[in-house]
Amino acid sequence: MMTVIGLTGGIASGKSTVSNLLRTHGFVIVDADLASRQAVAKGSEGLRQVAAVFGPEAVIAGEMNRSYVGQQVFRDASKRLALNAIIHPIVRDIMEEEKNQALSDGRDVIMDIPLLYENKLEDTVDEVWVVYIPEELQLIRLMARNNMTEESALARISSQLSIEEKKKRADVVIDNSGTMEQLERRLEEVVTEYYKSH
Ligand SMILES: CC(C)(COP(=O)(O)OP(=O)(O)OC[C@H]1O[C@@H](n2cnc3c(N)ncnc32)[C@H](O)[C@@H]1O)[C@@H](O)C(=O)NCCC(=O)NCCS
Ligand SMILES: Nc1ncnc2c1ncn2[C@@H]1O[C@H](COP(=O)(O)OP(=O)(O)OP(=O)(O)O)[C@@H](O)[C@H]1O
């Protein structure tokens, strides 16, 4: 019986970094951020709906204007809900198909879902792994990666359930507050433990 692991954490806690390392350990990664880009691809029905709700500035050269839409949704919860209502059902269909394909190939799957707890998706996976860093470090890494002001970074962080709450609910916690080498060692432990118990 193959296993479906939900991988989550806070924004900029290191989910993509962890996913990339877990891929080298043989897991198939199904990535919600990637699916959410497909959901509003050029010419898609998803993008048409985004333009209908957010106006013509939401599209630039046929693509979603991510910076404009991001500015809208991270400072206004009702706009965020409107965007989620368009994108999330499409994302779910894309991810479900990728997951089923991997399972039918006999592979263990990691579903990388930033909003797993926020969207109450715990029951759609067998276990949840949380990539954890304290909020102060989340702020530092997010500002550095996105070249973002403290205000914008805090708006993004506070649009999600707190990282401490996610940590409390996790089946496995992957602490990523140290170096990349420390993260790689922690993942070796997690994967060894995983194969012992499955
Ligand atoms: C708001 C958008 C346009 C911003 O695009 P941008 O390129 O700046 O960011 P990116 O897509 O790389 O997302 C970065 C991170 O932001 C966080 N985030 C994204 N959307 C949301 C949201 N609706 N609510 C809370 N956090 C979110 C996640 O941690 C995500 O990993 C984009 O994130 C989007 O279309 N979001 C809606 C779809 C969604 O919920 N995606 C997240 C998982 S499905
Ligand atoms: N152990 C580490 N030491 C230093 N920097 C790190 C470490 N792990 C990740 N980073 C950096 O922190 C930033 C966030 O990591 P990453 O993009 O993997 O997070 P994420 O959780 O996937 O983000 P998002 O929620 O936005 O999708 C990146 O710039 C990454 O290079």
Image (cartoon, rainbow, N blue to C red):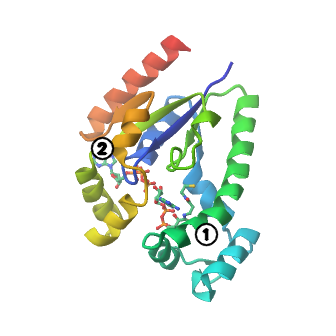
Q: In this view of the protein, which residue sits in the foreground, 176 or 124? A: 124
Is 48 situated left or right of 34 in this image? right
Ranked by sequence position, the earlier of labels 2 and 1 is 1
Residue at 44% across / 18% down in the picture? 192
Q: Which of the 4 quarters of the picture holds residue 96?
A: top right
Residue 27 is situated, as x and y percent measured from the top left of the image, at 56, 32
Residue 149 visible in the snapshot:
no
Mark 2: secondary structure: loop
Q: Residue flagged by tag 2: what amino acid is it? A: Ile
Q: In this view of the protein, which residue sits in the foreground, 9 or 179? A: 9
Residue at 45% across / 23% down in the picture? 191
Say which mark, if any, is on residue 171. Answer: none
Residue 39 is situated, as x and y percent measured from the top left of the image, at 68, 62
Is 187 situated left or right of 128 in this image? left
Q: Which residue is mark 2?
A: 133
Image height of 94 relative to 169, above or below: below
Disc 2 residue crowd, few under 14, some 14–19, many 20+, Cα 10 Å? many
Residue 89 is situated, as x and y percent measured from the top left of the image, at 70, 56
Disc 1 residue crowd, few under 14, some 14–19, many 20+, Cα 10 Å? some
Image height of 100 relative to 139, above or below: above
Say which mark, if any, is on residue 82. Answer: 1
Image height of 24 relative to 43, above or below: above
Image height of 193 relative to 161, above or below: above
Q: In this view of the protein, which residue sits in the foreground, 175 or 117? A: 117
Q: In this view of the protein, which residue sits in the foreground, 107 or 157? A: 157
Residue at 62% across / 28% down in the picture? 108
Q: Residue furthest bottom?
A: 56
Quadrant of the drawing holding the C terminus: top right
Q: Which of the 4 quarters of the picture holds residue 100?
A: top right
Q: Is mark 2 within 8 Å of ligand 2?
A: yes
